[in-house]
Image (cartoon, rainbow, N blue to C red):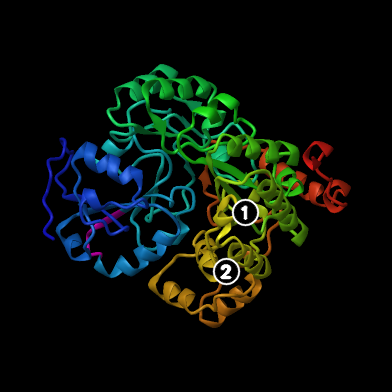
Amino acid sequence: MATRQLPLFALRRPQRVCFYDLSAGKSRAKFSAYTPKAMVFFSEKYGVPVVSDPADLASFDVVFFSLHCFRDFYKVARLAEHKRPGQEWIAGGKACATPTGVSWIMDYIWIGDCRASFPLILAGDRDLAGMWSAKNPDRMIRYVDEDIDPEPLSSSEIEMSKGCPRRCLFCIHPWRHHYQEAPKEKIKEFIRAHPGRGVGLVSNSSDDVSYYDEIAATLTESGKTDMIVSNAVQGLTESVVSQRKREMLLGVEGMSERLRWAVNKPIPRETYRAKLDLCLRHGKQIRTVYQLNLPGEEARDFDELVDDVTYMRRQFKKGSWAIPFIPNQPSAHTPFQWVVPRYSVEMADRVMEFRKSMFGSGATGITFYVPAVLGAAKWFAQVIAEWIPITPAVADAVQKIPPKLGVREMVQALDSLGVTLPREFLHRDRDTVFPWSNIITTGDDADKRKRFEGMERKLSSTRFTGTSQSVPEMWDR
């Protein structure tokens, strides 16, 4: 499909620029759910064309990539042959905090928020504090943490908060940003002015937003619903749940109370069950997200989850409950960066058996949906993208890794294919130098290592290793 150069605002120097859509949408109407919001926002605001056919790339001097996830690093590898001499490639998105995977092919990588900076980058400015450059790859760069901007992201979406006031050890949000909320009245104005029924109030967890009860009331008064609400479980209130018209997304993370306590998301089992009860009692669809492979995880943790599901099936004869499991991926710039990656094939198999057991559940009560868990080899492909450049040769080697191996076996398999991971991948201590150590995030503080060591103390404590506490008597009715 031929591309059309749209009008650009005044540039410092002439250049033809475009976004490349790695999700392969060929027009705005065909953008998928995996199309990065930043690409859509900036392309529409500044008239930057979006292309998805590699043959179109030769027409442009500068190509922007907004990387949605680590899988996009592999898509870039397959696209690299289409980069012509003299052309600049600039990445953002998932490469913000861990540029290693695409550093071999990108000329520049923007580290951090970009609303205020994008016009400068578009105008040709490359000497910016947050700009990683292939010409000086080891230069210390500070993650750009811009103030929250009340300008809508799209006709239906607006950012309500950024960052997170909690300190879950595995999550990037509290360690990358300072927590901020958009002005309450701006969000209310957006809700009332939006012509459609569904609005997207973007937030890591809407229940942490100090004024969300008021927003829930405004949504109800306006006949609107928040399409992308996410919840921190403890913050759910009767008023929010009763007024919610769409699925309730609950980030539970740990399959058991002891796991949640260890990773600093301490949701007591009593509270957890009470919030599920609240949602199902009001007839809401719920989606509870759990992680596999958390430190200290054992079979008994999954047993506790199964017990909780069994209890709710006895209590409620109708409803909808989705239970996705996400394999944990230790993240840069969090206390989990010192966690050695692990993948339990046995636990993944158990999840898949649990999934099968839920087929047809709606015929006798709550309808359960358990998506297939990400397999070991595909998970491994994501994890190593933080550590080594994902070149075409690496992408080819990763495709040959057997699908069901443990982490050490996958490291060995990759080595036999000519790709060697650094020793630090499996050996991490206080003095480990990570490949992303020249990136400083706003949320960095001296407590990150101490928080990791605090988790280690929890994992060896009697509370963690002893027999798990039973649910209080109130649940045995």
Q: Residue at x 66, y 42 (%)?
A: 448
CB atoms of marks 2 and 1 within 8 Å:
no
Question: Where's residue 309, x and y in %?
Answer: 67, 51
Q: Quadrant of residue 363?
A: bottom right
Tell whether position 247 is magenta: no
Callout 1 environment at 10 Å: few (<14), some (14 to 19), or many (20+)? some
Task: Residue under label 1, please give it.
Answer: 291
Q: Quadrant of residue 239?
A: top right
Q: Is residue 355 visible?
A: yes
Question: Where's residue 209, x and y in %?
Answer: 53, 26
Task: Residue under label 2, please give it.
Answer: 376
Q: Is residue 189 left or right of residue 331?
A: left
Q: Main secondary structure of the magenta part?
A: loop
Q: Is residue 167 visible?
A: no
Q: Is residue 438 above or below residue 243?
A: below
Residue at the far top: name it.
185
Q: Quadrant of residue 83?
A: bottom left
Say which quadrant the C terminus sits in: top right
Q: Work out whether residue 337 or residue 461 is closer to the camera in this orientation and state it.
A: 461
Q: CA distance from mark 2 to mark 1?
A: 14 Å
Q: Which mark is residue 75?
A: none
- Give the extent of the magenta segment: 83-89
Amino acid carrying mark 1 in the image: Gln
Q: Is residue 184 left or right of residue 384?
A: left
Question: Where's residue 451, x and y in %?
Answer: 71, 42
